[in-house]
Image: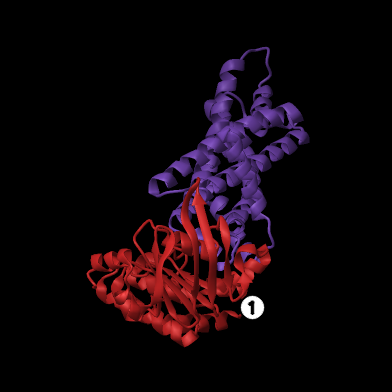
Chain colours: A red, B purple
Amino acid sequence: MIELKDVRKSFNGVEVLKGISTKFETGKVNLVIGSSGHGKSVMMKCMVGLLSPTSGNVFYDDRDFTNLEYFELREVRKEIGMLFQGTALFDSLTVEENVEFTLKMFTKMTKAERRDRVNFCLEQVNMAGINDKFPAEISGGMQKRVGIARAIALDIKYLFCDEPNSGLDPVTSRLIDELLQSITEEFNITTIINTHDMKSVFDIGDDVIFIYEGTNGWSGKVKDIKHSDNETLKRFIQASQFD
Amino acid sequence: MNFFSQFGLYLIFLKGMFSKPEKLSVYIDRTITEMNNIGVGSLTIVIIIAIFQGAVTTLQIAYQLISPLIAKPVIGSIVSDSSMLELAPTITCLVLAGKVGSHIASEIGTMRVSEQIDALEVMGINSSGYLALPKIVAGLIMIPMLVIISIFLSNLGGVLAGEASGILTSEEYLQGARESFLPYNLFFALVKAFTYAFIITTVSSFQGYTTNGGALEVGASSTKAVVYSAVAILFSDYLLAQLLL
């Protein structure tokens, strides 16, 4: 479980996150929704340590991530996988080398063991057999799936996805959604997804938090979202043509 | 003020690189790859520049010094000393600042804007150490080697130009070079080479690492890396000459 307690983040005196407190449960697909520029990505970056909150705390199963020493932080980070909006695959490495990367850096696996693990991860995302391709040689959807395979290569406990469906056609988007849902259930991990895609929310979401102007605008179960009396959330859903 | 804040960030960047490597063998592999990129990859341009540098210097020195009162080996002596003290280390490293520096800055800068550095950080890898340290170590090993090659080829260029133009024979050139040779000059050239290697690799890595934006900014970082490295090389050239000669 990941818990945020009164997380605030300012840039040059402008407060972007205005005290967000929430919990993300293990074994569930937690979705973070909200309009662009309201703080979703900043919140995710504070959670994975790419930004330091101005104040407040992020807890990973009771470990205060915001106040850990460098080497303790490194240990927690080994439990984190992240799928970036632009995939962020290492373009000078092949698909196999990308997925193998964390295994090579952090485990004592032999080359054969690493290859087995890479193949297993690629099979999980239906990408077996493209080991020797470079990221530039595969499509955007395939890159996303390889990104997921890389994220789950170590035995992670937390999976973060920033706009996993951006730039993908509807069919591939659904494929990625299903993949994230099945991985969450199979590995019993805490998955947190930043998205604008309301179809994803209704298809795979368990819990939802709606970020509005840097605050926790609404949070609850997906089934309750349409019955919410929160006006800004209603407008957001209406604009997404899902009311 | 901006200079001091940038210099402060540069020092913080350098300090951040030196933490315990996640896996030493990976860093060694990367260093060997970078040695190939920086050293072997720059060999052709260094060979061309060194030979022509020596040849042109010989012709120009001869043009200025031809007189019945001056012995011909003096030309060889001046060219070999100039090559060792200034031309080979400084000109070679200014060219390498352009070639290697822009390559390092654009490579790391592209990784920054495409979130690859963020991905490294999220994985728990010290990104500045992983990306920059192998390049710095490789530069410190290979650039002095390139400078030594450049010194040798510069003299070879001088010999060839002397023979081809009929100004002086190779024996006269080598006699002059041998008579004026001081081991301290070679030491001075190597001190310069190490200093310039550190400047080129660290300044370029820093510029790439702190890129913020998109493709345009990657280009700007690459340009800054070359300009700042060149200025720092020239400044340290003066400083080292003042201190060590």
Examine the image and state in which quarter residue B24 appears: bottom right
Residue A200 as seen in the image, left or right of residue B218:
left
The secondary structure type at the circle numbered 1 is loop
Of residues A233 and A146, the one drawn nearer to the viewer in this rendering: A233
Chain at numbered mark 1: A
Q: x and y percent of residue A175 in the render?
A: 32, 79
Report if residue A86 is visible in the image: no
* Residue at position x 39%, y 49% in the image: B215
Q: x and y percent of residue B182 in the render?
A: 77, 32
* Residue at position x 58%, y 16% in the image: B64
Residue identified by numbered label 1: A108
* Residue at position x 45%, y 69% in the image: A94
Of residues B183 and A34, the one drawn nearer to the viewer in this rendering: A34
Residue A3 as seen in the image, left or right of residue B23:
left
Q: x and y percent of residue B185 in the render?
A: 73, 33
Q: Quadrant of the N terminus of chain A?
A: bottom right
Residue B183 against residue B166 in the figure, above or below:
below
Residue at far bottom of view? A186
Residue at far front of view? A229
Examine the image and state in which quarter residue A49 appears: bottom right
Q: x and y percent of residue A123 in the render?
A: 42, 84
